[in-house]
Amino acid sequence: MEDQEQLKGCAERMMEKFVRLAEKMAKAQGLRQAEFARMVWPESSPRVAAYRWQSMRTKVRNTGKPQGVLISDAYRMSLALNQDLAYMFLLSRGEDDRKEAAPKAEKRAAQPDREEKGRKPTAAAKKATPARKCLIH
């Protein structure tokens, strides 16, 4: 149950970061929010498209969370921005996350493992390693 909650939180963070990235890219291309929404959902009325985009960027009244992003919507956003979807997912992980992860990795590399010191890893250390790890922080 705890793993499911962790993955759900990871997915929500990924969606939030993807939406922020799409918003940032649209702004960098000189697109207004309503214009970008019309490009993403051309079959919808401009008002509906704008509302849908707005609800993905802000918290919705009844749930207190932004509307979720479907993969199909993410793909449409990447097409509207003329970007590769996989590249956008990679970028949405965030440069700041990679910067935070680098010093931690260097610190771990500098410390010898318990096994290198001739000791066995503790049972607590084995349990502390989660089966699934969220890479989105």
Image: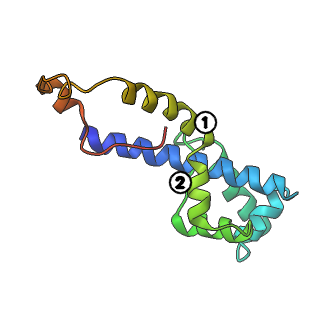
Disc 1 to disc 2, C-alpha distance = 23 Å
- Residue 23 at x, y percent in the picture: 73, 51
Please tell me the numbered disc located at residue 68: 2
Which of the pair 1/79 is nearer the observer? 79
Relative side of 126 to 72, left or right: left
Instruction: Classify mark 2: residues with Cα within 10 Å, few (<14), some (14-19) or many (20+).
Output: some
Please tell me the numbered disc located at residue 62: none
The local secondary structure at tag 1 comes to helix
The residue under the point 69% across, 71% down is 79
Give the quadrant of residue 32. bottom right
Dot placed on the residue nearer the N-terminal end, 1 or 2? 2
The residue under the point 17% across, 31% down is 127
Q: Mark 1 highlights which residue? A: 96
The residue under the point 34% across, 43% down is 133
- Residue 12 at x, y percent in the picture: 49, 46
| Picture colour scheme | rainbow
Which of the pair 103/53 is nearer the observer? 103
Tell me if residue 79 comes above or below residue 26 in the rendering: below
The quadrant of the rendering that contains the N terminus is top left
Instruction: Classify mark 1: residues with Cα within 10 Å, few (<14), some (14-19) or many (20+).
Output: few
Inspect the image, locate mark 2, and give the three-letter code of the amino acid beneath it.
Gly
Toward the right, the furthest residue is 30
Tell me if residue 112 comes above or below residue 6 in the rendering: above
Mark 1 or mark 2: which is in front?
A: 1
Inspect the image, locate mark 1, and give the three-letter code of the amino acid beneath it.
Asp
Toward the bottom, the furthest residue is 43
Check whether the beta carbons of the residues at disc 1 and disc 2 lie within 8 A of each other. Answer: no
Give the quadrant of residue 73. bottom right
